[in-house]
Image (cartoon, helix red, strand yellow):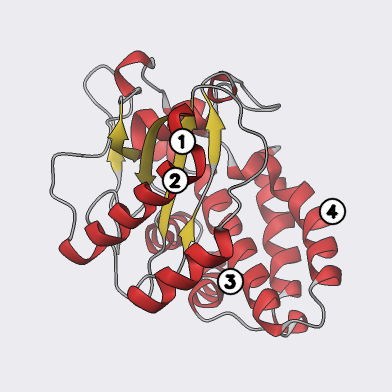
Amino acid sequence: MGSFLELGVDGFVKSIDAKIPLQNSWSKVVDRTIEFYKKEIGPELHSVYIRGSAAKAEAVEYISDLDSFAVTRIEVGDEPRSMDEFEKGIKEDFPFCNHVEISVISLEQLRETPPKRNRSIWEELIKTQSRCVFGEDLSDSIEPFLLEDMLGHSLYLDDEVRNKLPSYIEEDKDDPEELKSNCVWIMRRILRGAFDLVMVNEGKFTRDLYLCYEVVSRIYPDKEASMRKALDLSLNPSPETKEWMPLVLELNEWINSKRTT
């Protein structure tokens, strides 16, 4: 069901426990991912991180993804060239892994603070939610985080619902699998955006979807049914946008109203 990051006695968010051994099956996916980054980036590769359930050794086969990112010494530009071949190999050799997320960020870029946020999302991920699996771990060089610094999904949700999601749906209207991916993406954003509303008062942090649903539903019981439906759609998506867009609009409007009160 996931886990929380708690606060230390100093009030800062504790990091995940990276000393826990990786799950055996997932460690092989991690090794393949490291090799992919090495091959694609070469000597400019500084370090590789994994985050999410696999980093916490809590991955669930046939449900969890492997979320990864690489840090480079200089900006390398385009995304890795062999993505399709890599993804095909992962699906063939590790069918229990839903997807491998690949991202590349330079040392300079990871320090940048995006609009609306207090601090860099990449520094947050490295400091609190990631495990370094190759290269020099940057976490010790990053200042600790307060919960207020980690507000994120709710800040961008309205733009994603009103602008990004409609363009994605239009672009993918003839591809049921991509429409299902859009459904998963927006439901995850909504669940995590809703948790933004309560996490400071709760004094703990999570990105795990069930826990987001559980905590928000406890504090806002009138939203339990809608949050449960969002959780279900994040796991069992539909390509029929008419089945989930009303829910998206409802919860987006509610989250925005709570953010401004």
Q: Nearer the viewer, residue 123 or 242?
A: 123
Q: Is residue 220 left or right of residue 52?
A: right
Give the label on residue 39, or none: 2
Label located before the other in sequence (3 or 4)? 4
Give the label on residue 59, or none: none
Q: Residue at x 55, y 33 (%)?
A: 105
At label 3, which amino acid type do we have? Answer: Ser
Spatial CA span between label 3 and label 2: 44 Å
Picture coordinates of residue 232, whole percent (x, y)? 50, 77
Spatial CA span between label 2 and label 1: 6 Å
At label 1, which amino acid type do we have? Answer: Gly
For residue 227, above or below residue 152 = below
Residue beneath label 1, please? 42
Location of the C terminus (image quadrant) = top right
Picture coordinates of residue 171, whole percent (x, y)? 84, 69
Task: Using a 10 Å C-alpha cutoff, classify the residue at mark 2 as few (fewer than 14 neighbours), some (14 to 19) or many (20 or more).
Answer: few
Task: Using a 10 Å C-alpha cutoff, classify the residue at mark 4 as few (fewer than 14 neighbours), some (14 to 19) or many (20 or more).
Answer: few
Residue beneath label 3, please? 226
Secondary structure category for the residue under label 3: helix
Label located before the other in sequence (4 or 1)? 1
Residue 28 shows in the view: yes
Q: Nearer the viewer, residue 147 or 129?
A: 129
Picture coordinates of residue 195, whole percent (x, y)? 50, 49
Q: Residue at x 31, y 54 (%)?
A: 30
At label 2, which amino acid type do we have? Answer: Lys
Secondary structure category for the residue under label 2: helix
